[in-house]
């Protein structure tokens, strides 16, 4: 019997494409345009344009003309949309939730994910993580940090373990834990504008 090759679906070709899919599929309340995705993902419009074109051709995303803008949305009728959302939720969902819950904590200048979750996200081999380690840098209130961790844990169903560090502790790296974190993969979720960065999710 002659075999018919399945049409290749261009999923997770690059990290940029994975980030793009995560934004469009997991944050469906946003009206994404190429410009807003460029700002959100810190990627050039030309790079994103090529990825968007591939995803449109594969019918994984839809584009709707609204005025002079093209609004990009997930095609939830695509046969792989449901498993794709499940995969993206596992890979990126917790990071989105943690960024949301930790976003408004006064004194939290930076929020990083470290440990096994960040290592798997960066491509390091190993067992699937069963919890997420979060480092909060600054002069944040401990009670507010642990409350945010509890809320995030309730939403994603995975233990969230917060660690607090002052800016001085982070900069001097005099203890073993901070040195280990700095030498290992991390995912920066929040960096306040006053600290030379941008706030995640804004």
Image (cartoon, helix red, strand yellow):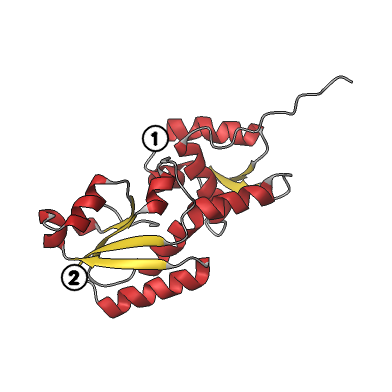
Residue at mark 1:
44
Residue 60 on image: x %, y %: 65, 41
Q: CA distance from mark 2 to mark 1?
A: 34 Å
Q: Quadrant of the N terminus?
A: top right
Q: Which residue lies at the image location 64% right of the left edge and 43% below the top edge?
A: 62
Mark 1 neighbour class, 10 Å CA radius: few under 14, some 14 to 19, many 20 or more: few
Q: Which residue lies at the image location 26% right of the left edge and 76% below the top edge?
A: 142
Q: Quadrant of the C terminus?
A: bottom left
Image-based side of 155 in relation to 188, left or right: right
* Viewer-proximal residue among 36 and 192: 192
Q: Which residue lies at the image location 30% right of the left edge and 72% below the top edge?
A: 105
* Upstream in sequence: badge 2 or badge 1: 1
Residue 180 on image: x %, y %: 23, 51
Residue 68 on image: x %, y %: 53, 42
State the residue lying farthest toward the bottom.
143
Residue 183 on image: x %, y %: 24, 45
Residue at mark 2:
139
Residue at disc 2, secondary structure: loop
């Amino acid at each position: 019997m002659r075999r018919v090759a399945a049409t290749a679906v261009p999923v997770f070709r690059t990290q940029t494409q994975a980030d793009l899919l995560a934004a469009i599929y997991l944050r469906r309340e946003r009206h994404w345009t190429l410009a807003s995705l460029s700002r959100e993902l810190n990627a050039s419009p030309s790079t994103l344009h090529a990825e968007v074109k591939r995803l449109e051709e594969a019918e994984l995303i839809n584009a709707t003309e609204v005025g002079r803008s093209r609004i990009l949305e997930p095609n939830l009728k695509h046969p792989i949309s449901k498993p794709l959302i499940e995969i993206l939720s596992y890979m990126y969902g917790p990071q989105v939730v943690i960024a949301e819950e930790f976003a408004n904590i006064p004194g939290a200048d930076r929020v990083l994910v470290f440990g096994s979750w960040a290592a798997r996200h960066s491509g390091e081999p190993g067992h699937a993580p069963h919890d997420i380690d979060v480092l909060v840098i600054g002069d944040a209130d401990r009670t507010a940090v642990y409350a945010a961790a509890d809320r995030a844990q309730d939403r994603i169903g995975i233990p969230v373990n917060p660690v607090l560090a002052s800016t001085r502790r982070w900069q001097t790296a005099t203890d073993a834990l901070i040195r280990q974190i700095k030498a290992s993969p991390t995912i920066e979720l929040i960096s306040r504008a006053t600290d030379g960065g941008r706030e995640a999710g804004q």
